[in-house]
Amino acid sequence: MNFDTARDADRTPHGSSDDPSVLDFSANTNPRVPEGAGAVYRDAFEAARTYPEEPPADYRAAAAGYVDCDAEAVIPTPGGLAALRLAIDLAVGPGDTVAVPYPSFGEYAREVRLQGGEPAFVSQEEITDADPAEHALAIVCNPNNPTGNAYPDGDLRVFAERCREAGTPLLVDEAFLGFTDRPSLAGEPGVIVARSLTKLFGLPGIRAGFAVATGAWREALANARRTWNLGTPALATGAYCMRQTEFVRETRDRVADERERVRTALADLGFDVHRSDAPFLLFDAGAAGDGDDGGERGVDAVLARAADAGIAVRDARTFRGLDSHVRVAVRTPAETDRLLEVLRDV
């Protein structure tokens, strides 16, 4: 990591409110957790009095079953962002350029800069057409955050092949892929997959995730990973959650149904809504004064009305390339009804 760059680095804006009285549509976490997860977390306390197993075999086996790869390819990390940092740290040096999608997760560019590299921004719609030979690393977010669209599996595999031919590693952030039935690229040669348990299992605070890689990249990531980098409760809870196949199936169905209901409602209110395969929707809030009834529209109006109602939504203007957009998470029907009631008045 570059010392001077780190001194000057800004924090990347994120969603999420730590106010328990706020109904939070700004963070894309599942409002439900697998039944029994809390008991597993509590039961792990006694085992936490000794160092966790190293490497954590059960967690790796659960992750391998979850994304359909070999357990040896799994590199446990404290959250998906730690997997991203580990990969970028190894792939990027001072002066290197990295193909980074936009609008997309802001931490990619920040992590590249922390290593002394330079993001080469490419439209997220065109990222699979980028020339990997020009860069030290290429990054794809699937489904993309904040737009929500997933890439066709064939397109990603063709891009992965082009990256292999160029000798450029491909880093695929699959933080939201568990909400779909699409296959993971985990185990694909030359590809580093980053996964998070934060989103699908509604547990951002336990900080559990993993990377998947093969060959030389697996060896480098496994050796660079800090020993005991996940605590015993996180390992136990994460392994338990990744084996809850019925919870995953039910969540996918519920989110898909509710997402479509919200998309239809937002469109009926006159908002331009982006197609999404993720547990959130991005919509164009319009410019101030654009309301059909002559009232105020625009991001500031939406944020203000939502805040007055005790609701947090995501100001998507913090994403590169967006200047009039809001992102909202897919939550429960009753919570969504509260949000839609507010948006009807905008």
Image: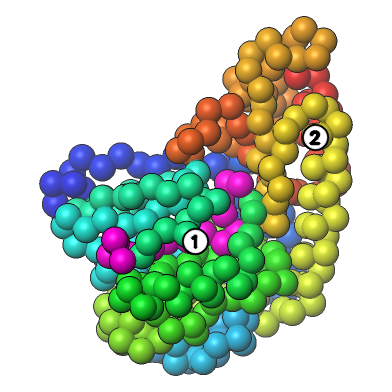
Residue that appears at 29% across and 61% down = 134
Q: Position of residue 220 (x, y in %)?
A: 28, 82
Q: 7 above or below 294?
A: below
> The disc labelled 1 sits on which kind of residue?
Thr
Residue visible at 77% across and 65% down?
252
Write down the quadrant of residue 30 in the picture. Answer: bottom right
Say which mark, if any, is on residue 24: none
Residue 143 in the figure: left or right of residue 281: left
The residue wearing badge 2 is 266
Give the residue furthest to the left.
4
The structure's colour scheme is rainbow
- The residue that label 1 is drawn on is 128
Q: Looking at the image, which is closer to me, 177 or 20?
A: 177
Q: Quadrant of the N terminus?
A: bottom left
Residue 19 drawn at (x, y percent): 59, 38
Whether the magenta-drawn stretch holds residue 139 is answered as yes
Q: Specify few, some or many for label 2: CA neighbours under 10 Å numbering under 14, 14-19, or 20 or more.
A: some
Of the pair 133 and 81, the residue shown nearer to us: 133
The boundaries of the magenta stretch are 133-147
Residue 46 visible = no
